[in-house]
Amino acid sequence: MNHEQFQQFQEDIRRDIETRQIARQILDVDEDASDDNLKRSWRTKCLECHPDRNPNDPEAERRFVVVNCAYRLLAEGTPCNMLLDEVERETSVSLDGKYNLDNAWGLFLWWRDKFF
């Protein structure tokens, strides 16, 4: 594995971690949420942001699609472009706002705090 491939590998891992964090944040579930809790939260969020229930909200349809994308990622492992777009909005700062995830050092510090 050359340096470019390694950097791409790191970027893919970082993006996957961020995408899953954002999906959990969208559905308001913990990392260790059971399938039942995940489905329950998904249903609740779908009802909250369904376009038919929010006819005057132009963002309702986008939020509804993003909620479904988040559920598909966490339940089935299927990534979705709309969810990846949400990650792009959050790229430069971690979810807790503590570390810059645009570089390896910031990613390492975030990882160290998260898992140790």
Image: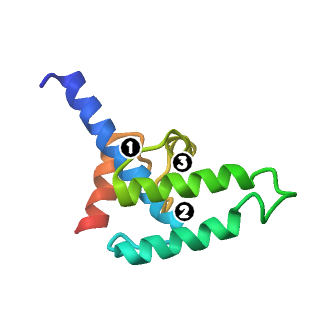
Number of other residues with Cα within 10 Å of mark 2, as a class: few under 14, some 14 to 19, many 20 or more: many
- First of labels 3, 2 by sequence position: 2
- First of labels 2, 1 by sequence position: 1
Q: Amino acid at mark 3?
A: Glu
Q: Nearer the viewer, residue 110 or 75?
A: 75
Number of other residues with Cα within 10 Å of mark 3, as a class: few under 14, some 14 to 19, many 20 or more: some
- Residue placed at 82% from the left, 56% from the top? 57
| SS at mark 2 in the image | helix
Query: Comparing marks 2 and 1, which lies closer to the viewer?
Result: 2
Number of other residues with Cα within 10 Å of mark 1, as a class: few under 14, some 14 to 19, many 20 or more: some
Q: Image height check: is 83 above or below 41?
A: above
Q: Amino acid at mark 2?
A: Ile
- Real-space Cα separation, disc 3 to disc 1, in angstroms: 10 Å
The residue tagged 3 is 90
The residue tagged 1 is 15
Q: Position of residue 114 (x, y in %)?
A: 31, 65
Query: Comparing marks 3 and 2, which lies closer to the viewer?
Result: 2
Check residue 94 in the rendering and tell me which mark sits there, or answer none: none
- Residue placed at 66% from the left, 69% from the top? 47
Q: Nearer the viewer, residue 17 or 57?
A: 57
The residue tagged 2 is 26
User: Taking the image as drawn, is residue 102 in sight?
Assistant: yes
| SS at mark 3 in the image | loop
- Residue placed at 69% from the left, 63% from the top? 49
